[in-house]
Amino acid sequence: MKKIIISLVFVCFSLVSINAQKVTVQKLWATDTILKVPESVLLDDIENCLWVSNIDGASGGNDGKGSISKLSKTGTPINLDWITGLNAPKGMAKYKQELYVADLTELVVIDIKKGVIKNKIKVEGSVFLNDVTVNKNGAVFVSDTRTGKVHRYENNMVNIEVENLQGPNGLLSIDDQLLILDRGSLLSVTPGGTITKIMDGMDPSTDGIEKVAHNQYIVSCWNGIVYFVTAGVQKITLFDTRTEKINSADIGYDAKNKIIYVPTFLKNSVVAYQLQIQ
């Protein structure tokens, strides 16, 4: 286990200024209520689709009702029951032709070409696995919000990568850096185990994170607020649907076309927003 050193270094359509940049979001489309408590969206350019994880029950329910849906990039259903028999699937990540899914206490590996579950990796001591990311070498990281840990799966072994966190959820691997959303804060972890807080003060339900540009990210919060974050500088609210009781769980992002995909959880839909930066 690595030694950890910690250091600190509306509603919809808002117009903001970020270091002379102007950022707007505009709603493009929304699916009908065809999904079943969608928690996460992942863009797959190779398969030309969106993967959506459906809890279809309690967030911690070990009930076999969970599934993965396949949508087109414009939200048209391709196969709503592409993978079934999961429990409460949440975050997803892709490496080569394998889809990794956080499913309560297991890391589920899906063969994308065959459309079948290839493996289920038990994460010992886990309670509520929540998000997944994969680094450039194929090491898989999965957060456990309830135990305050991030686990690493590599070479058929699961080890603790980071622990003693407040409530880790969203993960993003960029080169040698691991980003962690931890109950309202954005943390950066180096390979040596040093943790730096690069943003705080966000809604404590921080959920999904996607990279927009160097040191710029979109961060979603389950409660219904989405931020544009410039690391170490500022956070700007892009939109806030809390008063409408619309959640914004683990977002997906099309970097080429600058489209944000938002799973609305209890509203059973995915909503797409155009991000414009000037």
Image (cartoon, helix red, strand yellow):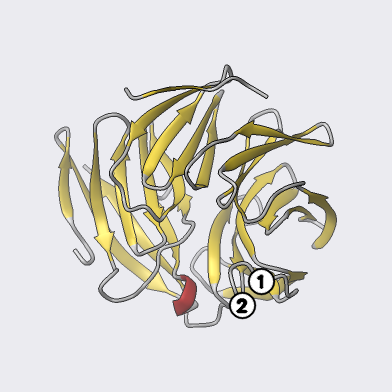
Q: Is residue 255 above or below residue 252?
A: above
Quadrant (top left, top right, bottom left, bottom right) of the C terminus: top left
Place residue 81 in its image quadrant.
bottom right
Say whether residue 255 is visible: no
The number of numbered badges drawn on the structure is 2
Front residue of 42 and 182: 182
**Of 17 and 104, the residue lying toward us:** 104
Q: Name the residue that disc number 1 marks.
A: 61
What secondary structure is found at the residue carrying circle 1?
A: loop
Label 2 residue SS: loop
The spot of residue 70 in percent (x, y) is 64, 67
Q: Quadrant of residue 248?
A: bottom left
Furthest-top residue in this view: 192
Q: Is residue 212 left or right of residue 94?
A: left
Q: The N terminus is located in which quarter?
A: top right
Q: Residue at x 54, y 65 (%)?
A: 39
Query: Relative to residue 241, is residue 177 depicted above or below?
Result: above
Instruction: Locate residue 221, reporting x and y percent.
Output: 38, 56
Compared across the picture, whether 259 is left or right of 19 comes to right
Q: Residues within 10 Å of mark 2 (few under 14, many from 20)?
A: some
Dot 1: few (<14), some (14–19), or many (≥20) neighbours within 10 Å? some
Q: x and y percent of residue 236 in the render?
A: 23, 46
**Are circles 1 and 2 on residues that touch, CB within 8 Å?**
yes
What residue is disc 2 on? 57
Q: From the viewer's perspective, is 175 left or right of 153? A: left
Look at label 2 and name its amino acid: Gly
Give amino acid for label 1: Gly
Which one is closest to the eye, mark 1 or mark 2?
1
Q: CA distance from mark 1 to mark 2?
A: 7 Å
Q: Nearer the viewer, residue 111 or 134?
A: 134
